[in-house]
Amino acid sequence: MGESISDPIAALEGARQHFANATDFTIGIEEEFQILDPATLDLAQRYGELRAAADASDLNGYVAGELISSEIEIKTGRCETFAQAASEIREQRRKLWALADRHDALLGVNGTHPFARWQDQVIIDTPHYRIVEGNLKYVAWRNNTFGIHVHVGIRDADRAMAVANALRSVVPELTAASASSPWLEDRFTHLRSTRTQIFTRMFPRCGVPDAFASWDEYDRFVRFLLETGSIREHTEIWWTIRPHQSFGTVEIRACDALPDINESIALCAFQVALTARFTRLYDEGRPLPVLEGRYIEENLWRAIRWGLDRELIDFETGKSVAATDRIKALLDACAEEIDQLALAPYLAPLERLLELGDNASQYARRIEAGESPRAVFAEQVERARASIDAVPSGAR
C-alpha cells in the first residue's frame, strides 16, 4: 500500500513476532479503482484531490494510493469476521462513490482500462513509489492495472508459510474466476486477464513464487535481496501470494478488480475459505498441495487466456477439466470452512459466475459479436455504482 520501510532488516526480524501474535482468519480487503473523467471515461490524474477530500471525511484512514495518480484504493483494515469485512468494504465503496460524485469524477472497476494510454499516467509522489519508479522506470510506467488483495491472518510464521505454499496452487482458479480485463490501450487483447499478463510478466519478484521450506528459508532469501541491494524494503516483493511481514497475514493478490461489489466479496470469501482449509489440513498433519512453479504457470496461462471458458488442469488426476468444475470442486472441498466461517451467504455471486462465465468472457462474447469495448466498459462503470446497494439475500 505504498508505505516505505525505514529499517528493512528490523522489519524482517520483527515479522516472526507479528505472526506469533496473529489471530487466525482475521481479514483485510483492498480494492483498486480507476479514477475517470466523467465526459470521456478516460483515466483522470486526480488521486491527490480525492485523497485530500477523503482524509477530511470519514474515509480518513481507509484510502490509499497505488502507483499512478489515476488510481485510488480503499481498504478495510483488520476485521474479526468475514461479515464485518464484507460490510466494511461495501460501505467504503459507497462512501468513495459519493465522494467522487461531489468532485465530478467517476470510478471504474476492471483489471485494466480499455483505452487509456500509459504515456499519459503520472506516478504518485511518495517515498515508496519514488523507489519503485526509480528502479523500474518503463516497467512501472506500463503497470496501469487494478486488482483485489485479500489479507488473512495466520498465527505462527512457519504455519503461514506452509499455507502460502499451498495457496500458490489455486492462483489460476482465482485468476480465471475474477477475470475482467480483456482490453488495453484501445485493443481487444483476447486475453481474459490482461492485468495478470501485464503485471506479473513485467514486474520483478512477481507472479507465483517458489515454495519455501520454512520461515527461516524465506527470511534468508529476503536478507539476501536486501544485502545484495536487489531491494531496499520487503514491499518490493510483489508475489501473487506473499506473507505480509507487517501484518501477520498471508496476502492473496491473484484477482482482477471486479465492477460488481457482490462478485468481489464472493471472490474474497472464496479466498478466505481456501486459506482456512489449507490451515486445517496443516494442523491435521495432512499433506498440502505444493506444486512446482512450472506446473502452476501452465494453468495460469490458461486462466489468463481463457478465464472460465476453457479447461484447467486437475493435478490430482493429471487431466484437463472444465475450469468451472475445478472451482466447484474447490468449493466442495471447503464446505467445512464455509460453514464454520459463515461464508455461504456471500458465495451466490460466484456460483452465478460459474453459470454465466467470468466477466471478461462475457465481455468478449459481446465484443466478438460487434459491440464496442468502450460501450461495454461504460456499462460496467454504471454497473459498479448500482451494485453497491444490491445486497444478496442473507449477506450483510
Image (cartoon, grey):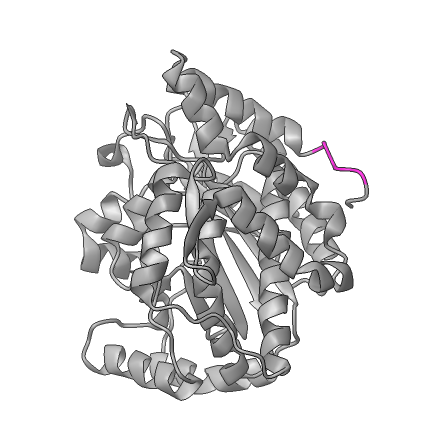
- Nearest the camera: 54 or 33? 33
Residue 188 percent location from the top left of the image: 31, 25
Q: Residue at x 32, y 54 (%)?
A: 298
User: Is residue 392 shown in magenta?
Assistant: yes
Report whether residue 67 is seen.
no
Q: Quadrant of residue 28?
A: bottom right
Residue 54 percent location from the top left of the image: 56, 44
Residue found at the very far top of the displayed protein? 370
Q: Residue at x 32, y 30 (%)?
A: 190
* Residues shaded magenta: 389-393
Type of secondary structure dominating the magenta stretch: loop
312 vs 160: above or below: above
Residue found at the very far right of the displayed protein? 394
Q: Quadrant of residue 271?
A: bottom right
Q: Quadrant of residue 143?
A: top left
345 vs 4: above or below: above
199 vs 210: above or below: above
- Nearest the camera: 245 or 64? 245
Q: How many marks?
A: 0
Residue 333 percent location from the top left of the image: 64, 60
| Left or right for 139, reference 293 | left
Report whether residue 24 is seen.
yes
| Left or right for 226, reference 108 | left
The N terminus, quarter of image: bottom left
User: Is residue 271 shown in magenta?
Assistant: no
Q: Residue at x 36, y 51 (%)?
A: 300
| Left or right for 67, reference 79 | left
Q: Residue at x 36, y 75 (%)?
A: 6
